[in-house]
Image (cartoon, rainbow, N blue to C red):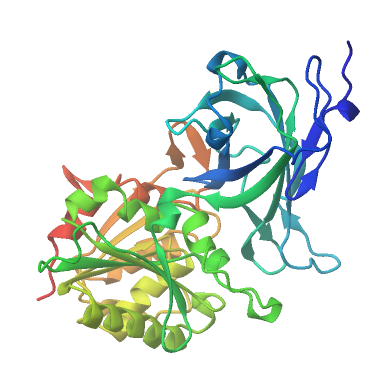
């Protein structure tokens, strides 16, 4: 019997359709068999991607593993902007396409996991779009459609037909480990708490300041407190088990600008400091070990924070930061906070010689790591993305890597 697409179940979020497969009769009077599913995501070095979908099928009965193959289901994904795109503007990374299923398996609960094709730079699968005219990354509205193309069998031999699929939430364990907060002045931020932070020991605090694309767009009523953790691994790197071992358990805070740091560093600096001081009052934080790091716009803001609050931070890590015309030579000369600057020589967004190298020449005792290109796991990224190296603890001087150097610094 031939089966065409019209005879198959294709149900996205909240949509239903009938399924007609060989040897399977769907009763007309019983409630439909429903499977909710989550979108399982991972933040890669180049940004977050949906890497799998998990179907809540354990409650439907034990599925025979042999009946589940990558061809049992197809997955279609559509990603659109959450805010209107103005005439003449454009958004990068919207898509409407089929996602290849590379593997199908049962997890320990008995739920079906469909693993999807993904890779750095792969079109389709990303969760963020970049609006060119606004210079903003936004979290895309995702609609996934699951289609069952072959019958499943339970272990007792009975067929299993899923008549409806309902899309659930986006799940990214690394991102979800950061809780949501808003400061007294209205700045939103995400916070990671180390294991055992309720004990009497005090912990370091790492402040991560995002790049220009991850701020809010208030004219569009868009302030998501999400892109700071989904656009790159800058903050997430410090929450990994490796980093947490090096820092002996650290809090990580990621404030989100209401626009972009360079717009008004003098206004944003007190708002960031308010968050830092509030956390230091409420949580078991060692005030001698508060660190600030950031990329691009956030690299500038990391330096700015050490000029405005010269005794607040044990160390600063500005990455590909903007310096020219926003920080004076005199301000740079007076920075006394231990500083390690990072950039790539092929950065054509923030030229390293006029910014990172210039700052290094003026900041006393500062360290610097200059890369030729940004390459990780064999993939070459734009030269501006040197934050990838810091998120992977790659910069080193001799045998000393940047995270170990940060962890060794204490405010005098």
Can residue 207 be seen from the camera position used here? Answer: yes
Residue 75, horizontal then vertical, whole percent: 70, 34
The part of the image, by quadrant, that contains residue 374 is: top left
* Relative depth, front residue between 57 and 25: 25
* Relative depth, front residue between 291 and 266: 291
Badge count: 0
Residue 34, horizontal then vertical, whole percent: 68, 41
Where 289 sits versus 343, above or below?
below
Q: Is residue 253 left or right of residue 365?
A: right
* Relative depth, front residue between 230 and 263: 230
Q: Quadrant of the C terminus?
A: bottom left
Where 24 sits versus 335, above or below?
above
* Relative depth, front residue between 372 and 242: 242
Q: Is residue 198 left or right of residue 30?
A: left
Q: Is residue 4 left or right of residue 169?
A: right
Residue 129, horizontal then vertical, whole percent: 66, 55
Quick one: which residue is furthest to the top in this view? Answer: 1
The part of the image, by quadrant, that contains residue 39 is: top right
Residue 3, horizontal then vertical, whole percent: 87, 18
The residue that appears at 37% across and 87% down in the rendered structure is 270
The residue that appears at 69% across and 81% down in the rendered structure is 219
The residue that appears at 83% across and 38% down in the rendered structure is 17
Q: Quadrant of the N terminus?
A: top right
Q: Is residue 228 left or right of residue 335?
A: right
Can residue 330 be seen from the camera position used here? Answer: no
């Amino acid at each position: 019997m031939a089966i065409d697409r019209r005879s198959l179940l294709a149900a996205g979020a909240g949509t239903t359709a009938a399924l007609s497969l060989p040897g399977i009769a769907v009763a007309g009077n019983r409630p439909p068999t429903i499977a909710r599913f989550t979108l399982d995501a991972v933040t890669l070095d180049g940004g977050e991607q949906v890497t799998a979908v998990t179907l809540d099928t354990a409650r439907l009965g034990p599925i025979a593993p042999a009946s589940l193959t990558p061809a049992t289901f197809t997955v279609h994904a559509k990603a659109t902007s959450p805010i209107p795109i103005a005439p003449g503007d454009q958004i990068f990374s919207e898509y409407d396409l089929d996602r290849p299923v590379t593997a199908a398996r049962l997890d320990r609960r008995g739920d079906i996991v469909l693993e999807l094709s993904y890779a750095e730079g792969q079109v389709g699968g990303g969760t963020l779009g970049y609006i060119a005219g606004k210079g903003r990354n936004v979290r895309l509205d995702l609609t996934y459609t699951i289609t069952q193309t072959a019958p499943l069998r339970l272990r007792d031999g009975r067929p299993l037909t899923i008549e409806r699929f309902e899309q659930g939430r986006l799940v990214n364990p690394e991102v979800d480990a950061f809780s949501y907060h808003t400061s007294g002045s209205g700045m939103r931020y995400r916070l990671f708490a180390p294991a055992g932070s309720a004990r009497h020991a005090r912990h370091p605090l790492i402040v991560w300041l995002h790049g220009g694309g991850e701020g809010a767009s208030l004219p569009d009523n868009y302030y998501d407190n999400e892109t700071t953790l989904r656009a790159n691994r800058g903050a997430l790197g410090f929450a990994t088990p490796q980093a947490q071992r090096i820092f002996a358990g650290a809090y990580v805070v990621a404030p989100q600008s209401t626009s972009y740091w360079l717009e008004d560093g003098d206004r944003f600096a007190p708002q960031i400091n308010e968050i830092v001081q509030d956390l230091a009052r409420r949580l078991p934080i060692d005030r001698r070990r508060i660190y600030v790091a950031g990329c691009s716009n956030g690299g500038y803001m990391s330096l700015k924070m050490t000029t405005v609050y010269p005794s607040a931070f044990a160390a600063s890590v500005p990455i590909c930061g903007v310096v020219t015309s926003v920080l004076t030579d005199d301000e740079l000369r007076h920075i006394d906070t231990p500083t390690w600057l990072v950039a790539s020589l092929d950065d054509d967004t923030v030229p390293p010689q006029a910014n990172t190298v210039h700052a290094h020449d003026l900041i006393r005792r500062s360290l610097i790591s200059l890369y030729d290109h940004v390459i990780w796991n064999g993939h070459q990224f734009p030269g501006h993305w040197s934050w990838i190296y810091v998120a992977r603890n790659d910069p080193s001087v001799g045998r000393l890597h940047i995270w170990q150097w940060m962890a060794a610094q204490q405010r005098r």
